[in-house]
Image (cartoon, rainbow, N blue to C red):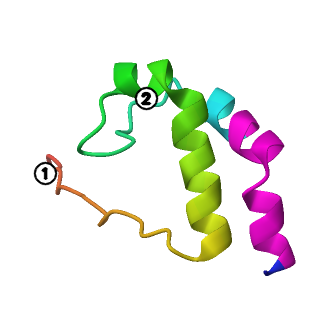
Amino acid sequence: MNKLIQQVASPEVLNNSWKRFKNDMAVWSENISRREMEKNIVFHLTTLANDLKTGTYQPSNVRFSTVSKAD
């Protein structure tokens, strides 16, 4: 396994990342509410780590919208 992936998938890095971005308004997944994510954080971070380590992680499509700007 790639050394960088091992580092990224470590429990310390994932936990620190969650702590840093948990107040971000971004949605974790379309199928998981923030409240559900927080209730089962260990499960979700463990699943993410396993997906990263096995190469099965598939990120969601990027969603964006255009914002009109007044001239």
Q: Position of residue 25 (x, y in %)?
A: 39, 30
- The boundaries of the magenta stretch are 3-16
Q: Quadrant of the N terminus?
A: bottom right
Image point (51%, 40%), residue name = 44
Give the overall secondary structure of the magenta segment.
Answer: helix
Q: Is residue 70 left or right of residue 23?
A: left
What amino acid type should be assigned to the residue bearing mark 2?
A: Met
In the image, residue 33 above or below residue 1 = above
Q: Amino acid at mark 1?
A: Ser
Instruction: Name the residue: 64% across, 55% down.
Output: 49
Image position, residue 10 (x, y; %): 79, 52
Q: Secondary structure at mark 1?
A: loop
Give the mark toward the camera: 1 or 2. 2
> In this figure, which residue is indicated by the disc labeled 2?
37
Residue beneath label 1, please? 68
Residue 29 falls in which quadrant of the image? top left
Magenta span has 6?
Answer: yes
Residue 41 is left or right of residue 60, and the answer is right
Tell me the SS state at disc 2.
Answer: helix
Q: Give the distance between the C-alpha atoms of the residues marked 1 and 2, in whole angstroms.
A: 33 Å
- Residue at 58% across / 77% down in the picture? 55
